[in-house]
Image (spheres, rainbow, N blue to C red):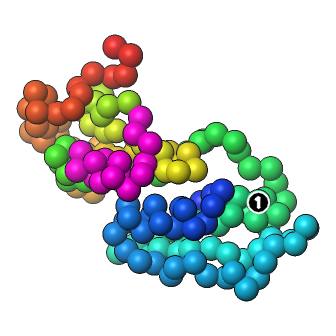
Amino acid sequence: MHAITLAVADVGRSAAFYRALLGIDGSGIIGTEYPASETAAGGTTAMFTLDDGLIVSVYGREDMRKDSGVALAEAPSTTIGHFEPSQEAAQAFLDHAAAAGATMLAAPYTRPWGMWSGFFQDPDGHLWEVVANPGGGDPAGADPEQDSVDPESTTATQPPGS
């Protein structure tokens, strides 16, 4: 996979959010010289190239609908995953997301299988999951007993609604 394009209501607003969240300038808003028509998509977008080469772009929702020819989902149906090496680092990323303007969801907690994560939504409702992955690489290799932190020091350790 080389790129992920997120359909957004306002490219400028989303570009500002992702610039703050990711801490990189990206391309800025480009393609404005290709305005949309009643039937054809416009070219306005903003792109951010991550350290591993993956490109995250934001593109107008209506433009994506016109480009693809399909109705887009109204609610999140996937998550964007972000792994951090510890619960402290994962909580710091969640805090950074909140400062960038994310909508924070239920407090993070540890799942019965030992994975600790929390969720937020970007300004267009795209769902992010921030995971503490102390084992690095494949999360299945993490040892919850060895890699966890004291539950007293985390924001929440129980699932939402329990």
What percent of the width, then of the height, locates residue 158? 27, 21
Residue at point 11% right, 33% down?
153
Q: Nearer the viewer, residue 53 or 28?
A: 28
Residue 61, image quadrant = bottom right
Residue at point 47% right, 66% down?
16
Q: Secondary structure at mark 1?
A: helix
Residue at point 45% right, 78% down?
26
Q: Which span of residues is magenta-colored? A: 90-105
Residue at point 80% right, 50% down?
71
Vertical arrangement, residue 88 with respect to residue 27, above or below: above
Is 47 left, or right, of 50 in this rendering?
A: right
Q: Residue furthest right?
A: 39
Is 74 left, or right, of 104 in this rendering?
A: right
The answer to whether residue 142 is seen in the rendering is yes
Residue 44, image quadrant = bottom right
Q: How many marks?
A: 1
Q: Badge 1 is on which residue?
A: 62
Q: Nearer the viewer, residue 38 or 52?
A: 38
Vertical arrangement, residue 139 with respect to residue 16, above or below: above
Quadrant, the C terminus: top left
Q: Amino acid at mark 1?
A: Glu
* Magenta-drawn stretch contains 104: yes
Q: Residue furthest bottom?
A: 33
What percent of the width, then of the height, locates residue 91? 24, 45
Q: Nearer the viewer, residue 65 or 141?
A: 65
Q: Residue furthest top?
A: 162
What percent of the width, then of the height, locates residue 23? 34, 69
